[in-house]
Amino acid sequence: MKKAVLLFSLILGLSAIGLRAQTAEDIIAKNIAATGGIEKIKALNSMKISGHAMAMGMEVPVNIFAKRPLMTRSEITFMGKTQLEAYDGTTVWQLNPFAPSGVIEPVELTGDRAKSIIDRADYDGDFVDYQSKGYVIEFIGKDEMEGSSVFKLKVTKKSGDVNVYFIDADNYLPIKVVSKVKVEGNVEEDEVIYGNYKPVAGVQMAHSMEIRSGGVTKFQITIDKIEPNIPIDNSIFVMPKKK
């Protein structure tokens, strides 16, 4: 009798694991469909994003260039000077006009600082082709957020970094992402609130983002314009030679 009970418990446990896995897959599939479908997502071969960020009461222009495969460049202009970070698929680098040394030269970035920029270069997001990326995705329950029902998906990357997605149960688009990222031996937690979704070449993209740390808003970003599939020369992603 005990063996029968144990066997029945094991079957129930395995069934529950199967249901959780299927639920995660179902939510991912519905998210990709709601975003525009895999064909339209992968048809975005390049884009330029123009917007502005509000920080400490100041408005700061922001431009982001992205291109397949895995190339990105972000520019933030402050007090007439432009700070940029870029990745050409091989090298991550930064140009900081506010460097304490006063010497304005491109600097190669490595380690955790480089990792976050490489992650940003994957504009398909965590859900597209997540198995081939080596990510593990789990359904961790249903919750309420600002009056909306949300599904929670936990994404664990090969690096050990974790993103928890709060997916709107009605339209299957992300409302919030909480990230736990390793930085120089410490784990930092940030969250991004997404809103004002609009279609760009048939793909739903958030046009407003609020970045919080420790419950305090650090930046509010508004996207003014997204130009899809425009010609972008690869040279803008490549680190210039030092003078």
Image (cartoon, helix red, strand yellow):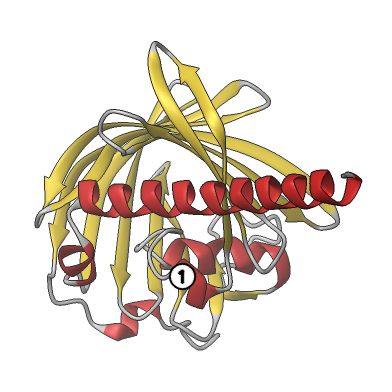
Residue 112, relative to residue 108: is it above or below?
above
**Residue placed under numbered mark 1 in the picture:** 86
Q: Nearer the viewer, residue 25 or 42?
A: 25
Residue 112, relative to residue 110: is it above or below?
above
Q: Position of residue 55 (x, y in %)?
A: 47, 29
Q: Position of residue 118 (x, y in %)?
A: 52, 69
Question: Outermost residue, left direction?
Answer: 201
Residue 3 placement, left or right of 112:
right
Quadrant of the image for the C terminus? bottom right
Residue 105, relative to residue 161: is it above or below?
below
Q: Position of residue 136 (x, y in %)?
A: 60, 61
Residue 160 placement, left or right of 142:
right
Residue found 53% across the figure and 53% down from its top:
21
Residue found 48% across the figure and 17% down from its top:
144
* Quarter occupied by residue 141: top right
Q: Nearer the viewer, residue 106 or 147?
A: 147
Residue 34 placement, left or right of 189:
left
Residue 30, relative to residue 129: is it above or below?
above
**Secondary element type, mark 1:** strand
Q: Can residue 222 be spotted in the picture?
A: no
Question: Outermost residue, front direction?
Answer: 1
Residue found 35% across the figure and 30% down from its top:
168
Residue 235 placement, left or right of 183:
left
Quadrant of the image for the N terminus? top right
* Quarter occupied by residue 210: top left
Q: Residues within 10 Å of mark 1 (few under 14, many from 20)?
A: many
Tag 1: amino acid: Ala
Q: How many marks?
A: 1
